[in-house]
Image (tube, grey):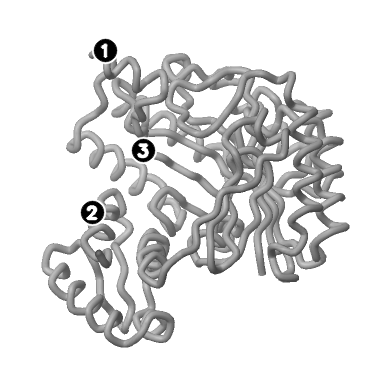
Amino acid sequence: MAGLYFHIPFCKRICAYCDFYKSADLRRMDDVLAAMHRELAARRGYLGGEPVRTRYFGGGTPSLCTPQQLGSLLEHAAELYDCTAVEETTLEANPDDLNGPYLDALRRTGIDRLSIGIQSLDDACLRLMNRRHTASQAVEAVRNARAAGFDNLTVDLIFGVPGFGGDSLRRTLDGVLALEPEHVSAYHLTVEPDTAFGRRAARGEFVPVGEEVSEEEFLTVHQTLTRVGYEHYEVSNYALPGRRARHNAAYWHGRKYLGIGPAAHSYDGCARHWNAASAERYAAGEAPGCEALTERDRFNEYLLTRLRTAEGIDLAEAGRLFGEPRRAELERQARGMRSSGMVRLTQGRLSVPPERFLVSDAVIGALFEE
C-alpha cells in the first residue's frame, strides 16, 4: 500500500519559523496546478501498481485552493492510480480559511481529514510567529469543521517559543483539549537560518529557548496529552486510540509514496526523488532529482524512521532486512545505552521511551552506521 502527497507551496503570509519551500506569489497557482496534473500522468508507473492507501495535501497552505481545484487533482489521480483502497485523505488548512461553505464543498471532494494549523491559542504568540489567524478563529474553525461533518481532525501546535511556555502553553493545551481533536501534532520550534526568526537570531534580536526549558515544555505537552488518553506514538504526534495519522506512517515504515508538486519528495523503495524547489522551474517541467540508496543508507534510514515511533525496531525484522551482523551490532550498542534510560530493549524490540523522544536524535545518531 502506498501514499500520494500533493505539495501546494503557496501562502498569503510567510510564518516567521517556516523553513519549507513556499511562495507568496499566488499568481503562479494556476500554472503549478496545471503542472501537477501533468506530473500525475507522467509518473503513473512510479508506485509499481501498488494501491494508494492515503492521500495528503500539504504545503504551504493547501486551503488556499478551491474545493474544485483539490477535487480535480483527486479525480485525476483516481483515473491513473488504484485509489479504491484509500483509507484517509488529509488537507492541511489555516483556521481562517475554514468557513462553513468551504468546508461543505470540501467534504464532497473525498477529503475526510483536516490538519488545522492552530500552533497556539495565545494571540501574542500567534502575532510573534506571523500567523494570519487569531485564537478565536482557530476555535471557530474546529467548530465549523465539526458542523460540516468532519470527524477526524488533527491540530498542529508549536512549543518552545521564547516567552510563551508556562501558563501560556498550558492554556493552549487546555483549550485544544476542550476541542477534543482526534490527533495532535506538537512540534518544538526550530530556528532555521533562512527564516525570519533565524535572521533575527543572527542579529541578536531573538534568543531560542535553552535545553532545560525545551525539556520542561516537552514534558508539559507529553504529560498533559497522555494523561487524558492520547497515545504518544511518534516524536511529534499524539492520537486517541485508533486515530493515528495513516499517511505519515508510510514515511515512518518505509512504504512507497509519490510526491506531486514543487519541492515534493518521493520514494519507490530503492531511491529518493525530489522536485525543483521553485514554482517557476517546476511549472516549466524541470526533471526531478534522484538519489539511489546504498545498503548503509537504507539501514540508517530504517533506524531514523523506526526509532521515532513508540514501537521502535523489531530486531528480528532488522536481521532479516539487513543481515545478522548488523542486528547483533545494533543489539550490542543498545545494551550499552539501557542503563541511562535512553532506550528500552524488551522482547526483542528496541525503542526510545516516549518521554525521552526529545533526545531521540542523539540516540539515533549514536547508532548510525558510519
Viewer-side residue, 151 vs 163 = 163
Q: Earlier in the sequence, mark 2 or mark 1?
A: 1
Task: Tell me if 141 is positioned left or right of 299 in this view.
Answer: right
Residue shown at the point (28%, 55%) measured from the top left: 360
- Give the class, few, some or many, for how many residues have Cα within 10 Å of label 2's Cα (few <14, many ≥20): few
Q: Which of marks 3 and 1 is in front?
A: 1
Under circle 2, the secondary element is: helix
Q: Which amino acid does label 3 sit on?
A: His
Under circle 1, the secondary element is: loop
In the picture of the structure, the residue carrying the numbered disc 2 is: 362
Give the Cα separation between the discs numbered 2 and 1.
Answer: 29 Å
Viewer-side residue, 27 vs 84 = 27
Q: What residue type is labelled 2?
A: Ala
In the picture of the structure, the residue carrying the numbered disc 1 is: 203
Q: Which of marks 3 and 1 is nearer the N terminus?
A: 3
Q: Quadrant of the C terminus?
A: bottom left
Q: In which quarter of the image is the N terminus?
A: bottom right
In the picture of the structure, the residue carrying the numbered disc 3 is: 188
Under circle 3, the secondary element is: strand
Q: Vertical placement of 359 versus 366: above or below?
A: above
Displayed quadrant of residue 353? bottom left
- Residue 40 screen position, x and y as percent: 77, 51
Q: Vertical placement of 281 versus 186: above or below?
A: above
